Structure formats: structure tokens, C-alpha cells
Amino acid sequence: MMRRHALRLGSLSVAWQPRTLLVCCALVLLALLLWTLLLGSGSLALSPGEVLASLLGQGQDATAQRVIQRVRLPRTLTATLVGMALGMAGAIFQSISRNALGSPDVIGFTTGAASGAIVQIMLFDSGPLATALAALVAGLCTALAVVLLARKAGTTGGYRLVLVGIGVGASLSGLNSLLLVTGNLDQAMFAQLWLAGSLNTRTWSHVVPAAIGLLAIAPIALYHARQVDLLEMGDASATQLGVAVERTRLTMVLVAVGLTAIATAAAGPIAFIALAGPQLARRLTRGCGVPLLSGALMGAVLLLMADLLSQRLAERVNLPIGLMTGLLGGFYLLWLLVRSRRI
């Protein structure tokens, strides 16, 4: 079993694992490297020194400074925040459902957010802000419906949560297709672009709400990390250890839904990140706890890597980031199936 150390600050005690800390530091360094590559990539290629000078406002090229600060930096920050939100949300859902497929894009929450955006686009012809708000509200409503339908004998979670989420997601996916087929062609094209998920044309108006939401919600998840770890032992064992099982589970579901809604509102539906981020983080850390922080960092790294690949592999094609992560997710699932001995 992985050895844990305790950091004590007065009456506060924080447990940490050396390998987990090492993996998190490595992920931060990798994210910084990807930042440097992304900020320097594009039609205007910049060296790492020019990127740093532009970030500090000391660049001699005014054009390069504007490109970095107004175009590339907001895009990269949005990718980082969205990846962190999805990675943490996926870790929570997989822990609560005790299922590796328990990610928001699999159990219907992302589809619900997409339904709200499509309704807003097709029926009300709304702009980006109203579309993002509609996605946020619809995602929360979908989560509430899934939790209520999955509740049985006073408990929520396990395979029932996953199955109910898949069913709700399939129903909403059919509704989305119906709206796209019966709607105006121009509006349907705009809705399809939104559904593909994109980091293009991200501005500071996307970065600020995502940053505020993540800073407000993530501490709640980290505060309940210990209780979530105990929930993985089973409801009976967790109750004996003093955990309010249903209250903790409901709190964490709301936290994960909030994180998913923030990410979807900022960049549209992004597949694969919430599914693979926590699993890869758990494999690297080999820890026994829920990989909240490491899963968030892995989610950010995966989305930054996907963004870099989408720019390098399709320089002449405006390839949405959601399509790239979907392709990566498909290969990842095939790899898991080939390696698994239980299927």
C-alpha cells in the first residue's frame, strides 16, 4: 500500500503521498511546456524568449504582443481551466458510481447541457452568452433528473446512476437530433459547430467566468476528498467511520455537475477528458484515494496536448478541439478493451 505522510498546521492535518506529489509536479511542468509550445505556435511563430517577453509586456514586436495577450493566452487559459474542471469532475463521478465509465459525457450530463444550448440556438437564435447560460442551467437540470431517477431505497450511486444517466443521455441525444433536423439550416450549422466543442475565438470573457467558477467549486471538492475516499469502501463502512453518506454523495454530485457545466459553457461539449484524465492519473500515482488534484492536472495536460495536435495536424483546417478529443477517446477505449481481461 502507498505510504502516506501527514502535514500538520496546528489543528489542521493534511495527508499526502510522495509519489502523488511527484506526479503532480511533473504534470505542472508538462503543462508549462505545452503552454510555451501553444503560445509560440501559429501563423506567427515565436520563440520561448519572445513568448515570455510578450507575456511580461516587454516584447519589442507590438503585433506579437497583441497576438499573445488577446488571442493565444485566453485560448490556452480556457483549455487549462476546462481540462482541470473536467478532470476533477470525472474523478468524482467515477468514485461515486464506482465505475470507470462514470464520466459526465457518458452518463448524460454533457448531453443535457448541449440540449439547453441547442434549444437556445434553434428556438431563440441567441448569442454566445445566452447559449452558455442555457447550457449551464440545462446541465444542472439534467443532473437533478438523473440523481432523482437513480435514487433507490434512499441511496444514489453505483451502476444504477450510470445506467440511468446513459438512458437520459440517449433520450436527450434523440431530442437534439430532432431539433437540428427540423430547424433553420443556418441555425443548425451554428449549433453543430457548438456541439463539436471549440477553443477558437476564446476571449477573456470566457476565461474569467471559468476561473471564478473553478476557484469557487474546487475547494469544496478538495475539502470532502477524505469522505469520498471512505465512500469507496462501501456505504456501510463509511457510515461506521462517521461519514454522512447520502449528504456527502449529493454534495459531490452537485460539485461535479457544477464543474462540468462550467467547462461546457466555456468550450462546448468536450469528450474523453473527464473519462481518461482520472484513470491515467490513478495509474501514474498508484494511490488509493480519489485523484482529485492529479486528475485535474492530467485533464489540463490532455486538453492542452489535444489542442496542440489539432493545430499541428490540421494547420489548414479549422479542426474543433472536441473532434480531436473524441478521436483520442475512441482509441483510448479500444486500448482499454484490448488490455482488459474481464471483457
Image (cartoon, rainbow, N blue to C red):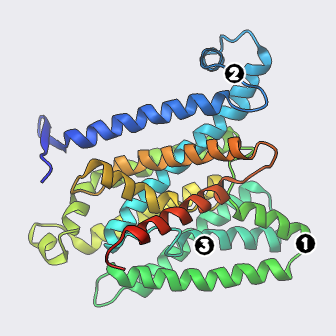
Figure check: 323 above or below 68:
below
What residue did someone put label 3 on? 111
Query: Which of pointers 2 and 1 indicates the residue nearer the eye?
Result: 2
- Amino acid type at circle 3 is Thr
Total marks placed = 3
Q: Earlier in the sequence, mark 1 or mark 3?
A: 3
Residue 17 tag number:
none
Nearest to the observer: residue 140 or residue 75: 75
- Amino acid type at circle 2 is Leu
* Mark 2 in CB contact with mark 1 (< 8 angstroms): no
Residue 185 tag number:
1
- Residue at 80% in and 20% down: 63
Which class describes the residues within 10 Å of circle 1: few (<14), some (14-19), or many (20+)? few
Q: Which of marks 2 and 1 is nearer the N terminus?
A: 2
The local secondary structure at tag 1 comes to helix
The local secondary structure at tag 3 comes to helix
